[in-house]
Image (spheres, rainbow, N blue to C red):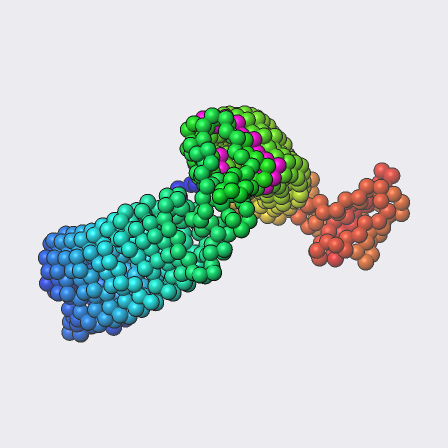
Amino acid sequence: MIKRLLTMACAAVFALAGRAQSLSATVEGITYTVEEGAQTATVSQAYVGLTTANILGTVEIEGTAYPVAAIGNGAFMDCMSLESVTLPQGLRDIGESAFQNCASLASIAVPEGVMAIGSYAFSACTSLASVTLPEGLESLGVGAFTACRALPGITLPSTLASIGGAAFMECSALESIAWPSSLATVSGDAFNGCILLADVTLPDGVTAIGDYAFSRCQSLAAITLPSTLESIGASAFYEAPLADITCRAAVPPVLDDQSFDREHYMEAALHVPAGAEPAYRAANGWMNFFDKATVDGILYVVNPDTRTASVMDGTSAAGSFVLPATVEYEGEDYAVTSIGEYAFYSCMGLTSIAIPEGVTSIGFGAFGYCRFLESVTLPSTLAEIGVAGFGGCISLRDIHWPEGLQRIGDSAFEECTSLESVTLPAGLVEIGEYAFCACESLQEIILPAGLQSIGAGAFEECSMLASIALPEGLQYLGEGAFAYCESIESIVVPQGMAAFGAYAFEGCMSLSSVTLPEGLQAIPEGAFCETGLESIDLPESVTAIEFYAFAECASLRSIALPAALQEVGSMAFAETPLADVYSYAATPPAIEADTFDEAVYAEAALHVPSDVVDAYRAAEGWEQFQHIDGDLPSTGIGSVAVGASFARYADGVVTASGLAEITVHDANGARVLHAADATTLDLNALPCGIYIISIEQGGQRQVLKVAR
């Protein structure tokens, strides 16, 4: 069965004719190659059993001397016995995986002139204890020295601007780093797992620290962050036992999810520039380093300037817990206004929580995986539930929703497998991605009239959800929003939606009835694949049916394609056993050879307008149909009968002698205007082109063919 992400098999094509010729020579087990037209040689391969490699600075090939400028990708890869390498002056580039897994290599001196070291160039060189990098080096690739477990220190050249992702990851002996002033970025995972790294002072000039950059640095007790720092990525210091953090930036750098661990906030000392403390106290994440109060076992971060408090650690809560509206700290009351990231995460003793009035936000994963939490009361002041706020609360059945709630964050209630019925509040405007994904007991959800957006996968795999009423004001329906809701039987996509997400209703096996709005322009990729559709009316506005849109619809026996349709994508009806295809377009829409199955081309009847049968028989793709019947009404293009004469057309306006029904079609046969009981109809808002106007009055009919 073909699923949402198809694995497409690609045939390899080798262009033998005209292939560029190359020259090569092998000296002492090392192969040098010169590509056609090149003036320099590249080391392309080495004998896997080499123990010593003295790479030539110049190599003679067929009587011509070529300077050696590069070590090619994978040239010495897996030379497990290689102990020493001499790199020549004049070298400019060391390619990807050039010395990867040379487990016996003890040292390397990269000569001046080398500007780039490729990704994984020296990764898994587990005996490499000495590395000399040259001035002039500008680029250090992803994983360049990953798992060089014997390397005790590194001096980075002053010309290096960025350290590639995972460049020194798992360098478990690394204790010292000489940082260059030119450095701007420490990329994600750069020093992840450097377990002996104890003290780091990053130079001014560094603006960004990537995700997991110093995570699992199990000896890292102190970090000094530069004055230029602007952002710190997710989990940058995960499981690093920081006790002392100095940040020289006057403006607090932006923190991502869990840039620092909860233990850092609780135990580490934070030092900031004089006069910057108020800014840090107010900044997301940084505020957690400051004043803290413990009340009834719950840890709060308090802000003396705003007299507010945020729950930092509530994992000791048990039973039915009522969060206080205020907490006392040093004789003063502080209003509880927020619940921080992971504050109650995996709190196994908590069965119900009442959140007080005044709380305006619930942070990332705040109640995630509280597996015995059954009931939640949310305050009217709450505007947003954060990402994964209650995700994985498998016992949660009862939620008291506040009318002021505006947004439910991504994965907020994902895998809340005991939820059965949800009535969302009137003020809600957005449901985030995967918000109720895999709520496998959810049978009913009532959406408010003001809802504007339903994110990707919001109700995916809600297998017991039997019905859903989408509100008329809905503007956005994301990819896979209701995918694999196997019990949904019908759906009405509201008027006003010109598009919705790919695979929105994929795998809805019980879905037999769909109503689509006029104005819809395309049936998205995979939108109704693997559904129980028996029939569907496509709006006249549809111009495209995309890849896999109606694939694997085992009960769909016929389809009517509207007159405005211009293209139908590859495999749009794959494994769908159509018996009748009705195409009303005057010009055959563009299709692919595999838009329909071979059995459909051979056995199904294709019904087309009577005056364009030959066009379909000649059109690419359509010509595969063995049974083409011209039994649909003529398009009228080029052969319009005048009939009675009681109407006229002038200056873009059709005028009838009395009340009449006036219908306008474009040259493709699509209806574009209609008026009942009218004497005039203005066409001036239509694009320039050919139009067919039908006027019916008192049992008579007049047809006009006009150009505007």
- Which residue is drawn at the image coordinates 22% and 63% (left, top)? 71
Seen from this angle, which residue lies furthest right? 658
Seen from this angle, which residue lies furthest front? 331
Q: Is residue 480 magenta?
A: no
Left or right: where does residue 139 sit relative to residue 672?
A: left
Q: Main secondary structure of the magenta part?
A: loop
Q: Nearer the viewer, residue 261 or 273?
A: 273
Left or right: where does residue 52 sit relative to residue 488?
A: left
Seen from this angle, which residue lies furthest bottom? 64
Quarter containing the C terminus: bottom right
Above or below: residue 55 compared with residue 475: below
Left or right: where does residue 574 sit relative to residue 426?
A: left
| Quadrant assignment, res 92 | bottom left
- Which residue is drawn at the image coordinates 68% and 46% (left, top)? 669
Above or below: residue 91 compared with residue 564: below
Above or below: residue 698 compared with residue 81: above
- Which residue is drawn at the image coordinates 71% and 57% (left, top)? 688
- Which residue is drawn at the image coordinates 85% and 44% (left, top)? 678
The spot of residue 139 in percent (x, y) is 31, 63
The spot of residue 223 in percent (x, y) is 33, 55
Quarter containing the N terminus: top left
Magenta residues (range): 372-392
The spot of residue 483 in percent (x, y) is 51, 34
